[in-house]
């Protein structure tokens, strides 16, 4: 299984952000950039996940993408729980660092996939002047929940803490990691899987390949999804928004097809919707060329 050969090479940067060693992947341009884009990966993913999309963007598009705390090459949090608000604070600090290092010149488009899309949408409402546009890839949020579920959720959280961190499966070699990625996404090309495997996991001293993610990410979240708070943030978004979904959503996304969910989207003032055909949740892997075209049409 031969890995994908990237058309554009990324550079590595490291920054001290809120007590953590943060890794940032940077795809520079040969000349002055027409656009700079900051990309945020999803749950159980890494910044290298955007390589195929970047390779289909024009050469004058400069891209930055961090590994979130506890993922990839970024250090793990000194906590037994990953709190969603920390992603917002990390993003805010990262943008400040990029500005101070003169890597970015001002507000730039923000793109997020899945969990990264949810972070991006909240941030766009919290810091509406910090970005120039928002591109949300499958960051659809979560189903509404009854606040009465809170006691049970807190019990589940406490019970999990008592048990310790969840365990992560290890793999015999890089090829086994690639096969796992292809099992997760049956549309994933073999060469893409081989490329991602080398970034998603690495060999340990025991000879096994281990996923580059803090097992605590798989733990139960203590708090419920608070739709009203989310919508309050969405209403404060001031920039144009490209809301991108895939044609083949999984069963977990059935709530997106309801009228109640469509009413949620009315909270976002300047919204364009885009459907990427023949793609699932990992649409930047399934159809990177079509997604790149949609992004450029939006930015232009």
Image (cartoon, rainbow, N blue to C red):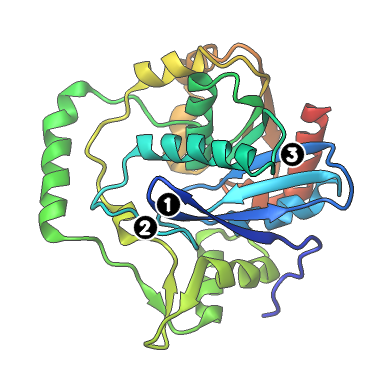
Judging by the rendered image, the residue that carries numbered circle 3 is 36
Numbered disc 3: secondary structure: strand
Which callout, 1 or 3, points at the residue further toward the start of the chain? 3
Say if mark 2 contacts mark 1, CB within 8 Å.
yes
Question: Marks 3 and 1: in contact by CB < 8 Å?
Answer: no
**Residue 173: image location, x then y, percent:** 50, 83
Evaluate whether residue 131 shows in this view. yes
Picture layout, residue 237 above or below residue 288: above
Please tell me which residue is depicted at 50% across the width and 27% down the height of the picture.
123
Q: Which residue is mark 2?
A: 76
Considering only order in the chain, which callout, 2 or 3, is on the residue closer to the N terminus?
Answer: 3
Q: Looking at the figure, which quarter contains the C terminus?
A: top right
Please determine whether, in this image, residue 128 is positioned above or below residue 82: above
Q: Residue at x 31, y 40 (%)?
A: 83
Per the image, the residue denoted by label 1 is 69
Q: To which quarter of the image does residue 169 belong?
A: bottom left
Q: Determine the secondary structure under disc 2.
A: loop
225 left or right of 199?
left
Crowd band around label 1 with a 10 angstrom C-alpha radius: few (<14), some (14–19), many (20+): many
Q: CA distance from mark 2 to mark 1?
A: 5 Å
Q: Position of residue 113 (x, y in %)?
A: 56, 42
As rendered, which of 90 and 161 lies closer to the eye?
A: 90
Locate residue 211 relative to residue 148 in the image: left or right: right
């Amino acid at each position: 299984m031969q890995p994908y050969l990237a058309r554009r090479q990324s550079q590595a940067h490291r920054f001290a952000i809120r007590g953590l060693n943060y890794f940032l992947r940077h795809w520079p341009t040969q000349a002055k950039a027409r656009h700079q884009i900051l990309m945020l990966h999803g749950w159980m993913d890494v910044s290298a996940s955007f390589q195929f999309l970047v390779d289909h963007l024009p050469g004058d598009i400069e891209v930055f993408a961090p590994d979130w705390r506890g993922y990839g090459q970024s250090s793990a949090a000194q906590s037994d729980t990953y709190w969603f608000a920390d992603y917002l604070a990390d993003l805010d600090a990262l943008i400040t660092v990029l500005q101070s290092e003169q890597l970015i010149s001002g507000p730039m488009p923000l793109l997020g996939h899945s969990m990264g899309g949810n972070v991006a949408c909240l941030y766009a409402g919290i810091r509406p002047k910090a970005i120039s546009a928002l591109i949300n890839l499958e960051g659809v949020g979560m189903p509404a929940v009854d606040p009465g579920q809170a006691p049970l959720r807190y019990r589940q959280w406490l019970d999990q803490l008592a048990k310790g961190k969840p365990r992560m499966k290890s793999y015999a070699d890089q090829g086994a990691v690639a096969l796992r990625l292809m099992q997760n996404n049956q549309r994933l090309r073999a060469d893409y899987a081989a490329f991602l495997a080398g970034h998603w996991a690495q060999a340990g001293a025991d000879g096994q390949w281990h996923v580059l993610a803090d097992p605590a990410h798989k733990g139960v979240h203590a708090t419920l999804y608070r739709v009203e708070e989310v919508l309050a943030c969405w209403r404060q978004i001031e920039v144009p928004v490209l809301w991108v979904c895939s044609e083949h959503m999984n069963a977990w996304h059935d709530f997106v097809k309801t009228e109640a969910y469509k009413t949620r989207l009315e909270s976002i003032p300047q919204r364009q919707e885009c459907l990427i055909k023949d793609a699932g949740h990992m649409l930047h892997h399934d159809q990177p060329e079509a997604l790149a075209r949609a992004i450029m049409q939006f930015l232009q």
